[in-house]
Image: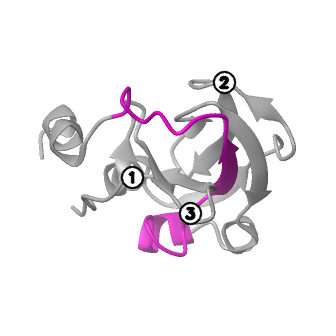
Amino acid sequence: MNFPAELKYTQDHEWIRLEEDGTAVVGITDFAQHELGDIVFVDVSSVGQSLAQGDVFGSVEAVKTVSDLFLPIDGEILELNSAVEKKPELLNSDPYGDGWIIKIKPANTDFDALLSVDAYQELVGA
């Protein structure tokens, strides 16, 4: 499995990457997509809302189950990835690239509570 070192991770299997323009991109990890199986639908109805760290911002539906998506840090949901909305299988094929889920405007950039790549790998036993 792939775990990019430049990302921060949550115990709920989301990743976050701070962009140069101050926004952040959020998606699910390779581990999460592998555990879910074939993803068939992404539901994010929180665009435009400000949410707190740990709040549910949407869900992903796989053939076997539906799983909530949790916001890694406080912030405003700016955008849902339209490519994922049209082709949810991108979460399976490219979870760290074209399969990102949302862009947010972080309320802060304090990522200290998030997991490093090493801590996340330890969490999932990789």
Residue under label 2, please give it: 52
Type of residue at label 3?
Trp
Total number of numbered labels?
A: 3
Q: CA distance from mark 1 to mark 3?
A: 10 Å
Q: Are marks 1 and 2 in contact (CB under 8 Å)?
A: no
Q: Which residues are magenta?
A: 90-114
Say whether residue 116 is left or right of residue 37.
left
- 7 and 87: which is toward the camera: 7
Q: Position of residue 23 (x, y in %)?
A: 64, 56
55 magenta-colored: no
* Figure colour scheme: one colour
- 121 and 35: which is toward the camera: 121
Q: Which mark is residue 47?
A: none
- Image vertical order of residue 18 relative to residue 13, above or below: below
Type of residue at label 1?
Thr
Say whether residue 80 is left or right of residue 22.
right
Q: Which mark is residue 29?
A: 1
Quadrant of residue 55 within the rendered picture: top right
* Chain-order first, disc 1 or disc 3: 1
Q: Position of residue 2 (x, y in %)?
A: 24, 63
Q: CA distance from mark 1 to mark 2?
A: 20 Å
Specify few, some or many for label 1: CA neighbours under 10 Å numbering under 14, 14-19, or 20 or more: many
Residue under label 3, please give it: 100
Q: Overall secondary structure of the magenta stretch?
A: loop
* Chain-order first, disc 2 or disc 3: 2
